[in-house]
Image (spheres, rainbow, N blue to C red):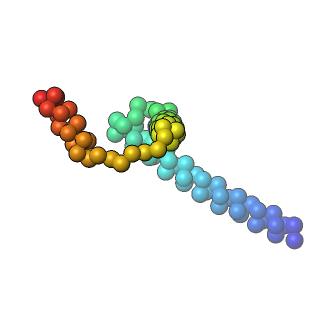
Amino acid sequence: MIMSYLSDYLRIRHEHASKNNHTNRTTRNLVKRQIDDGQFGNDSEYICHPIRQDQHSQERLFEFRQALKKGEASGKSRPLDMSAVKRTGRKLIKAAD
């Protein structure tokens, strides 16, 4: 019975290792293509890219939440006067010309 469990365990470990090796090769090939295409200078830049993107997204989300809090704290809203918005926009466009 113990030999059966041991055999199953070793078989599963071998299958898992084979899948990991395939995944690692696929990942290495993807990174190499990205570098060869000139999108990244080396593998470190490739790995850091999604981290930087996430940091940027987190910063934008923080700023958005801060703006929401500021808006909520500013008091009760007023009806929007679209005519005034359009007039202001036209003045800005005219001033830019």
The quarter of the rendered structure image containing the C terminus is top left
| Side of 36 where 72 appears, left or right | right
Where residue 77 appears, as percent x and y from the top left, is 43, 45
Task: Mark yes or no: residue 73 visible.
Answer: yes
Q: Name the one closer to the observer, 77 or 23.
A: 77
| Side of 91 where 77 appears, left or right | right
Q: Name the one closer to the observer, 81 or 24.
A: 81
Q: Name the one closer to the observer, 42 or 18.
A: 42
Q: Which residue is drawn at 61% across and 57% down?
A: 18
| Side of 96 where 69 appears, left or right | right
Q: Which of the 4 quarters of the picture holds residue 95?
A: top left
Task: Mark yes or no: residue 57 visible.
Answer: no
Q: Which of the 4 quarters of the picture holds residue 7?
A: bottom right
Where residue 29 appears, as percent x and y from the top left, is 45, 46
Q: Which residue is drawn at 36% across and 48% down?
A: 79
The quarter of the rendered structure image containing the N terminus is bottom right
Q: Which residue is drawn at 71% across and 63% down?
A: 11
Where residue 38 appears, as percent x and y from the top left, is 34, 35
